[in-house]
Image (cartoon, coloured by chain):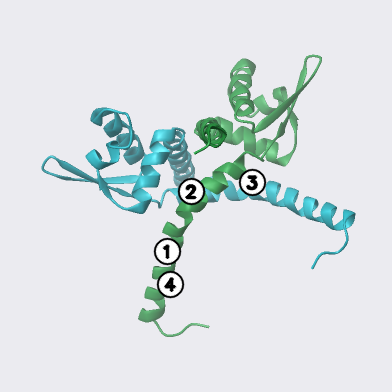
Chain colours: A cyan, B green
Amino acid sequence: MLSSEKNEGTQSEEQLNLIFRALGDRTRRALLAALSHRPAMVTELAEPFAMSLPAVSRHIRVLEGAGLVRRAVDGRVHHCSLSAEPLRNVEAWLGHYRRFWEGTLDSLARHVEGDSETQP
Amino acid sequence: MLSSEKNEGTQSEEQLNLIFRALGDRTRRALLAALSHRPAMVTELAEPFAMSLPAVSRHIRVLEGAGLVRRAVDGRVHHCSLSAEPLRNVEAWLGHYRRFWEGTLDSLARHVEGDSETQP
């Protein structure tokens, strides 16, 4: 393996670490869900949570570190927007495992077909 | 919202926490990858890692906690197997965000089509 390939592999593993850890928190997933509807200021994002502004800001920083949120600072106002691109890595990682549950569905379908009358 | 619905929601959020946190570690992802090829004993799983048996065992316990690994104990031998089912939750969670990168691909495709001659 070339050293550059090894570095790329290590980098993408490190990025997956950051993404999965960022997603392992309910509040952070809720922040992403809010931003999937529209960009928002940190103060707006904080509103629905019984949480201080600095606490929400810390969660946003974790999401930024994983590349999932972009923050634009305009004076004292922080505008956040979703950056969904890194989730492609999760999609790619998940791809290897999809056959397991798709296989389960296939065998369930065969089981149902074998057990009952033919359905339209 | 019914209280049972709320509990279900909280439970699935808690399960997503466990799954994402379990996946946020390169060694644990490598253990899952190994188990996706075939079930294995903890001692076999530990071999490729420069890691003590108890350390690998701790990682496997985290994966078990997230429902991603099953462990069957036969005397002193621990047999592990992949349990991919909980990854469906990740798939479902990801589904909400897929449109963002699929949208990007669509606009890229339109851009390429508009810029170049029609391709077969």
Q: CA distance from mark 4 to mark 2?
A: 20 Å
- Please give the residue where the numbered disc 3 appears in the rendered image: A97
Query: Between residues B80 and B4, which one lies in front from this camera angle?
Result: B4
Query: How crowded is the residue under tag 2: few (<14 C-alpha within 10 Å), some, or many (20+)?
Result: some
* Secondary-structure class at tag 2: helix
Q: Pick whichever of labels 4 and 1 is earlier in the sequence.
A: 1
Query: How crowded is the residue under tag 1: few (<14 C-alpha within 10 Å), some, or many (20+)?
Result: few
Q: Is residue B83 visible?
A: yes
Q: Amino acid at mark 1?
A: Gly
The numbered mark 3 sits on a residue in which chain? Answer: A
The numbered mark 1 sits on a residue in which chain? Answer: B
In the rendered view, tell whether residue B1 sits above or below residue B77.
below
Q: Closer to the observer: label 4 or label 1? A: 1
Q: Amino acid at mark 3?
A: Tyr
Question: Do discs 2 and 1 belong to a common subunit?
Answer: no
- Please give the residue where the numbered disc 4 appears in the rendered image: B109
Q: Pick whichever of labels 2 and 3 is earlier in the sequence.
A: 2
- Residue plotted at (36% across, 53% down): A37
